[in-house]
């Protein structure tokens, strides 16, 4: 059964523009390497201000762990994370499975 990972980064107030620039400059190279598992990125709008939300899909938890290990050791990701992480106030991750009535 596939699992989905919902990752929400709440940024410090006023940092969305800077984060967007970092993603455009340094995020795209590492994301392109791993986008097979990426469902999409979103920006919070009403109620979820200052948030970057992304969803990933994996066949199982083993694949999820392997991919994140690869990402965290990727040189392009490290360049990105060095600039992006100081903008993050809070990070929340949720693992989800698809509801059985929609499969």
Image (spheres, rainbow, N blue to C red):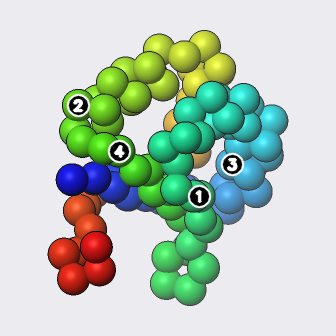
In contact (CB < 8 Å): disc 3 and disc 1? no
Q: Quadrant of residue 43?
A: bottom right
Where residue 66 appears, as percent x and y from the top left, is 33, 24
- Name the residue beneath numbered marker 2: 62
Coordinates of residue 64 in the picture (x, y in percent): 32, 36
> Tag 4, which secondary structure?
strand
Question: CB atoms at circles 1 and 4 under 8 Å apart?
Answer: no
Is 29 in front, or is 103? 103
Above or below: residue 37 compared with residue 76: below
Q: Residues within 10 Å of mark 4 (few under 14, many from 20)?
A: some
Q: Count how many numbered circles sit on residues in the image.
A: 4
Q: Residues at badges 3 and 4 in contact (C-beta under 8 Å)?
A: no
How far apart in space, not on screen, are marks 1 and 4 (Cα)?
16 Å
Name the residue carrying label 4.
58
Q: What's the mark number on residue 76?
A: none
- Compare residues 40 and 9 and report the one nearer the observer: 40
Q: Which residue is mark 1?
A: 41
The kind of secondary structure element at disc 3 is: helix
Pinpoint residue 87: horizontal percent, then vertical percent. 58, 45
* Mark found first going from the N terminus, 3 or 1: 3
Residue at 45 percent of width and 56 percent of height: 55
Q: Earlier in the sequence, mark 1 or mark 4?
A: 1
Occupied quadrant, residue 49 = bottom right
Residue beneath label 3, please?
Answer: 19
- Residue at image point 59% right, 40% down: 35
């Amino acid at each position: 059964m596939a699992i989905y990972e919902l990752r929400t980064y709440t940024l410090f107030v006023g940092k969305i523009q800077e984060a967007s620039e970092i993603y455009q400059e340094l995020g795209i190279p590492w994301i392109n390497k791993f986008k097979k598992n990426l469902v999409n990125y979103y920006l919070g709008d009403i109620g979820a201000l200052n948030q970057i939300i992304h969803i990933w899909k994996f066949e199982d938890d083993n694949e999820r762990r392997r991919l994140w290990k690869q990402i965290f050791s990727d040189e392009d990701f490290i360049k990105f994370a060095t600039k992006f992480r100081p903008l993050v106030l809070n990070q929340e991750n949720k693992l989800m499975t698809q509801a059985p009535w929609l499969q």
